[in-house]
Amino acid sequence: MLVDQTNDTGFATLRVLVQRFPVLREMSKTAELNPEEFTKLSSESFAWPGERKYPVHNKEHAALSLAYSKVAAEMIPTDVRCALEKAAEVYGIPKGSFDNPVMEKKAAAEFWLLPEKKRFRVASSEDVKVAEQLLHEKYAQLSVYDRAEAFLQLHKAAEHFDVPLTPSTEKLAGFTITSTQVLKDWLEAREEAALKLGSELASAYHLMATKYAGVRPFITNRNDQLKIASLLNEMDKKAGIDRFYGKTILDPLRTVFNTEKLASDALNLGGYTFSLKKLSALPSTFWSDALGSDIVKEIAPDGNVKMSALKEILPTLPQDLKTTLGRQLAAYR
């Protein structure tokens, strides 16, 4: 669900936008933000008539709509963006007023997904999606550690430039945990493949599989996960099993990061992945405005936001509210 002035819970996103775009405060200070007023508007009063989003019936709301559109630019159709630009022109809003948020980081605005090798440069939001596609295309040519490092750095770049990544990319960045049962199943599949190939490593796969029988259900430490993936990578190449990747056998990284369940310090909201540590650093007033006073009492019982409470409560929110909240939080990045 897209957030604009018609459905911004507690106007939490608006407060962030005013910080990002100081010019917005003056442009919109006389705007009427009563929800009942929006219901009275005709569909033609919105830049997105079919969704009744981004009202442009006066200069104040055209400015607000332009600012809100920057939070979800990748989700807005071209004709809606054109309508917003046309409204800005009609009302005399200077072109580019909302193109350079003051909160955007200028220092360290360049990322190398493989810093030591100076490969896969990302210096803009557009580069993030290009790099994501390129990493998937070049995936088979990278070592296990280079794959993991490149996807991790891509995640950091995506956070910096506020660009959502696909769930499969988040998984390869190492933000999901390992199911030992699923890992055991894939080790047994490797044992069968090795037997068919006549490889002596079949017994090694069998031994590894038995080690994960009846143990703790999940592996959550990223270093441990990468060690397992690296070992499998070496064994698979020696056994010749790498020829089956993408067919009957998952490659080592996907074998290890084999669930959709996020690691302990990560949480997915509305397609965005956030660090729980960073979420807990937000003031309790944000959560009160976004979720209401009753919920904030559970999240911050003594006025300080508890990471454990966020981890327990946020996943239980209705999906539409999680989507809205994800969009609002993206503006804080």
Image (cartoon, grey):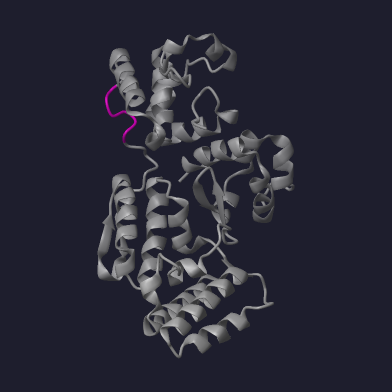
137 magenta-colored: no
| Residue 182 in picture, x, y percent from top left | 58, 68
Q: Is residue 36 above or below residue 153?
A: above
Whether residue 26 is visible to the viewer of this picture, yes or no, is no
Left or right: 222 with respect to 61?
right
Residue at x 42%, y 35% (from the top left corner): 72
Q: Which residues are magenta?
A: 94-99
Assess whether residue 98 is covered by the magenta stretch.
Answer: yes
- Relative to 58, residue 209 above or below: below
Q: Main secondary structure of the magenta part?
A: loop
Q: Quadrant of residue 98?
A: top left
Q: Quadrant of residue 241?
A: bottom left
Task: State how many labels appear.
Answer: 0
Q: Measured from the top left, where is residue 144 in percent x and y?
A: 39, 72
**Horizontal placement of 11 versus 160: left or right?**
right
Residue 330 in view (yes/no): yes
Residue 178: which quarter of the image?
bottom right
Could you say where residue 116 lies in the image, as x and y percent from the top left?
Answer: 29, 71
